Image (spheres, rainbow, N blue to C red):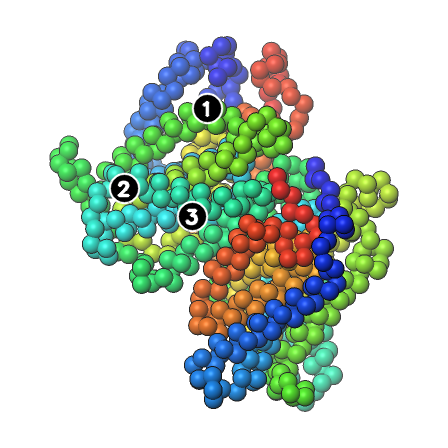
């Protein structure tokens, strides 16, 4: 915002100064620049994956399939960021909306119901369905304090898979719904059904969805609603006394977040071809929360980057670490009663332990996340307001 | 800063609570009992069924399970009452408590009931409880010291996020270091049916119910009768004022965590002794149910938490009596949402759930 007025000192992401006026240009052409950035990322990622050392971990096709899967989590993190980062509400049952989106598409396009509604309109339907559930859940609880929302969403996230599991007459229980159709372009660009063998169409599709979502989120963030969210997050009482309807505003954050998860769910179900209740356990909500917190609550690009990095770390990083340590053949150390055998540790099991540690350490040491938004950093450090806007002195830089 | 929690003006109490509550409680118990008789006799046929025996088995079962939830719920409500934080890690403290019981009992070399040696049995059980309560109490204090205290003045979201982080750390520490599947805890208490008048009760059930009530009575006595208890209450009402009057806030909050976590540790031992099994992920759902119990009774209110725990126990047993046991979580969750919508202060709630 201020970028258009005068050069602003870097906020971590963009480096220093207004490089060749790019920052100003981005400020004026927000959506276009988002498109440009995503396109660059879309081209860079597959190229990086064929460079060493990454090409040793898998073929380019594997990597692209992984990126498409990571895109689902990027979308989840972006949506959760609206709830947690923008509005400051803790949603611990986010996977429930993901599940609702996925099952919506499973009902609309599988042999289970016999329907075959195309993928593209169902994206919207899935998002709307998830948003409706968001409103249904949020309406009774958002009147109460934020802590209650956390526990109610936690319960909701726990119950939704249980319902999908137990109502086996309607959901096919543990086995879930299989045979879900893949997206199809009906011959456009010579592409029909996406199938399972080629990851590229999925990669492009999820990037397109992410692009649209990021564009919308940027617009929301700077809109009247976005400012209301920030006001609410900073001081609910003050916001209410300035005429913000706190319940409606929170409800909007909650349902917009839910709708993004619904989108992700539809894509996920279609890509995988099947949905089962155990894909939507609490771990998914927790992973999404870890992505938002580590990426930097409130910062759209930060959260997206956090999600991509965490996804790749958990799917590739831990596997490689495990293989690497196993290959070292470290001898087991027997120190009296304590037996240390690093080679026997299964690093893949450590995933959630590491997330837990990361969450706690981030909150204690760097609550603004790895890629903080400027506002969050000021807010969370509660230092005197030596901010970039009032201080002409570049020594205001922190960290 | 957190704000003070205000009490309901006495003038607004419509009916004398001392009269209404016991009557309502007795009515609810009678209804629950009738429902249990009907449900458990449905398969046999109500006419031929031994109604007294069927009903009381389920009733005692509900009291036992409810006791476990009540013990956990007390920890939630104590902590919430004093620092207004939902301690998500509390369910995992309970789970760790059950693993401490498993560790202690197996290390002592027991694998089954200790029959015909009452002094040894008492000694072993008391020792297990002491170890688990002490260890989990210390764990609770450590969690508070390192995960919550530094964030006491941070935005509200921050301690909630560390709480959920800590819960994952505890759960996965057990998962990685001890076992990723179900662990058998030695059930050292022999299990003959005792006949007390017309009541037939198993030894373990009697033990659990008596223990739960004793612990609650001890807690109540501690909070209402001792200086430290008074410090806890005053800190809960107004932290700044308490500090001005010489209460050491940090140690009072640490003490609260110690007591709450020790109770969860005791609940963990009960889990081990009663069900004979434990697993790394029981804490999550138990915690959720116990939190519901705390909200149901009125969060911040210790009597309410105990009452709520028993209500949850009854809901769960009723669900299984009627053959919908797998929906019991959904029923409990439904109860939570209903309470939050219609009576956010809970059944007894003297402390207001701050309507923001």
The nearer-to-camera label among 1 and 3 is: 1
What chain does mark 3 sit on?
Answer: A
Q: Position of residue A311 (x, y in %)?
A: 41, 42
- Tell which of B168 and A107 is nearer to you: A107
Total number of numbered discs in the rendering? 3
User: Quick check: A282 left or right of A35?
Assistant: right
Q: In terms of secondary structure, where does tag 1 sit?
A: loop
Image location of residue B317, percent across then percent down: 53, 71
- Comparing B96 with B26, the one in front is B26
**Residue B269 placement (x, y as % from top left):** 63, 69
Quarter of the N terminus of chain B within the rendering: top right
Q: Quadrant of residue B155?
A: top right
Q: Residue at x 82, y 53 (%)?
A: B230
Left or right side of A139 for A30: left
User: Label 1 is found on which chain of the structure?
Assistant: A
Q: CA distance from mark 1 to mark 3?
A: 27 Å
Identify the residue under disc 3: A95
Disc 2 crowd, CA 10 A, few/some/many (<14, 14-19, 20+) = many
Is residue B290 visible in the rendered structure shown here?
A: yes
Q: Is residue A88 above or below residue A287?
A: above
Depth check, mark 3 against mark 2: the one in front is: 2
Q: CA distance from mark 3 to mark 2?
A: 19 Å
Label 2: element kind: helix
Mark 3 vs 2, N-terminal side: 3
Mark 1 crowdedness (10 Å alpha carbons): few <14, some 14-19, many ≥20: few
| Res B17 → quadrant | bottom right
Q: Which residue is mark 2?
A: A122
Q: Residues within 10 Å of mark 3 (few under 14, many from 20)?
A: many
Q: What mark, if any, has residue A223 been given in the picture?
A: 1
């Amino acid at each position: 915002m201020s970028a258009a007025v005068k050069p602003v000192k870097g906020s971590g992401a963009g480096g220093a100064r207004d490089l060749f006026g790019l920052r100003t240009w981005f400020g004026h052409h927000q959506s276009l620049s988002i498109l440009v950035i995503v396109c660059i990322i879309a081209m860079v990622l597959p190229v990086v994956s064929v460079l060493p050392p990454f090409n040793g971990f898998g073929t380019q096709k594997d990597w692209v399939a992984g990126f498409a899967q990571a895109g689902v989590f990027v979308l989840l993190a972006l949506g959760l960021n609206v709830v947690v980062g923008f509005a400051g509400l803790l949603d611990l049952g986010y996977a429930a909306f993901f599940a609702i989106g996925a099952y919506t598409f499973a009902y609309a396009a599988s042999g289970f119901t016999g329907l075959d509604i195309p993928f593209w309109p169902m994206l919207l339907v899935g998002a709307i369905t998830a948003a409706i559930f968001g409103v249904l859940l949020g309406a009774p609880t958002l009147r109460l304090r934020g802590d209650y929302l956390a526990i109610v969403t936690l319960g909701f996230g726990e119950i939704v898979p249980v319902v999908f599991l137990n109502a086996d007459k309607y959901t096919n229980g543990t086995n879930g719904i299989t045979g879900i159709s893949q997206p199809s372009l009906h011959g456009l660009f010579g592409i029909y059904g996406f199938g399972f063998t080629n990851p590229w169409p999925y990669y492009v599709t999820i990037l397109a969805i992410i692009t649209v979502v990021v564009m919308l989120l940027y617009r929301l963030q700077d809109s009247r609603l976005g400012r209301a969210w920030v006001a609410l997050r900073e001081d609910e009482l003050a916001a209410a006394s300035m005429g913000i309807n706190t319940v409606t505003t929170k409800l909007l954050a909650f349902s917009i977040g839910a709708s993004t998860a619904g989108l992700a769910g539809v894509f996920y179900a279609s890509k995988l071809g099947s949905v089962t209740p155990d894909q939507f356990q609490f771990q998914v909500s927790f992973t999404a929360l870890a992505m938002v917190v580590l990426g930097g609550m409130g910062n759209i690009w930060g959260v997206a980057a956090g999600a991509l990095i965490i996804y790749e770390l958990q799917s590739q990083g831990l596997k490689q670490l495990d293989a690497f340590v196993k290959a070292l053949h470290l001898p087991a150390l027997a120190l009296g009663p304590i037996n240390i055998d690093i080679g026997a540790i299964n690093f893949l099991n450590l995933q959630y332990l590491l997330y837990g540690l990361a969450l706690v350490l981030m909150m204690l040491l760097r609550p603004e996340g790895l890629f903080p938004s400027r506002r969050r950093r000021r807010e969370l450090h509660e230092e005197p307001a030596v901010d970039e806007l009032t201080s002409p002195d570049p020594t205001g830089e922190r960290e | 800063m957190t704000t003070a929690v205000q009490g309901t003006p006495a003038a607004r109490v419509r009916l004398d609570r001392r009269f209404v509550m016991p009557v309502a409680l007795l009515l609810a118990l009678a209804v629950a009992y009738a429902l249990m008789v009907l449900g458990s006799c449905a398969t046999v046929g109500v006419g031929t069924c031994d109604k007294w025996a069927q009903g009381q088995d389920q009733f005692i079962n509900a009291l036992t399970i409810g006791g476990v939830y009540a013990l956990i719920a007390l920890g939630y409500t104590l902590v919430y009452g004093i620092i207004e934080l939902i301690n998500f890690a509390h369910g995992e403290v309970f789970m760790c408590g059950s693993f401490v019981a498993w560790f202690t009992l197996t290390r002592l070399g027991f694998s089954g009931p200790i029959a015909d040696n009452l002094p040894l049995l008492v000694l072993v059980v008391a020792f297990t409880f002491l170890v688990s309560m002490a260890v989990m109490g210390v764990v609770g204090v450590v969690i508070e010291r390192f995960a919550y205290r530094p964030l006491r003045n941070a935005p509200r979201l921050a301690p909630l996020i560390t709480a959920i982080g800590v819960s994952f750390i505890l759960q996965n520490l057990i998962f990685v270091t001890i076992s990723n599947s179900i662990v058998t805890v030695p059930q050292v208490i022999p299990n003959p049916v005792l006949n007390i008048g017309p009541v037939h009760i198993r030894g373990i059930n009697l033990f659990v119910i008596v223990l739960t009530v004793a612990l609650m009575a001890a807690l109540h006595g501690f909070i209402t009768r001792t200086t430290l208890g008074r410090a806890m209450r005053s800190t809960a009402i107004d932290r700044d004022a308490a500090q001005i009057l010489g209460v050491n806030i940090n140690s009072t909050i640490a003490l609260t965590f110690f007591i709450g976590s020790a109770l969860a540790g005791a609940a963990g031992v009960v889990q081990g002794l009663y069900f004979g099994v434990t697993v790394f992920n029981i804490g999550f759902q138990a915690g959720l149910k116990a939190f519901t119990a705390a909200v149901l009774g009125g969060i911040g209110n210790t009597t309410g938490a105990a009452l709520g725990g028993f209500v949850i126990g009854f809901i769960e047993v009723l669900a299984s009596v009627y053959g919908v046991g797998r929906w019991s979580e959904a029923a409990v969750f439904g109860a939570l949402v209903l309470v939050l919508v219609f009576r956010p202060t809970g059944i007894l709630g003297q402390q207001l759930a701050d309507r923001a």
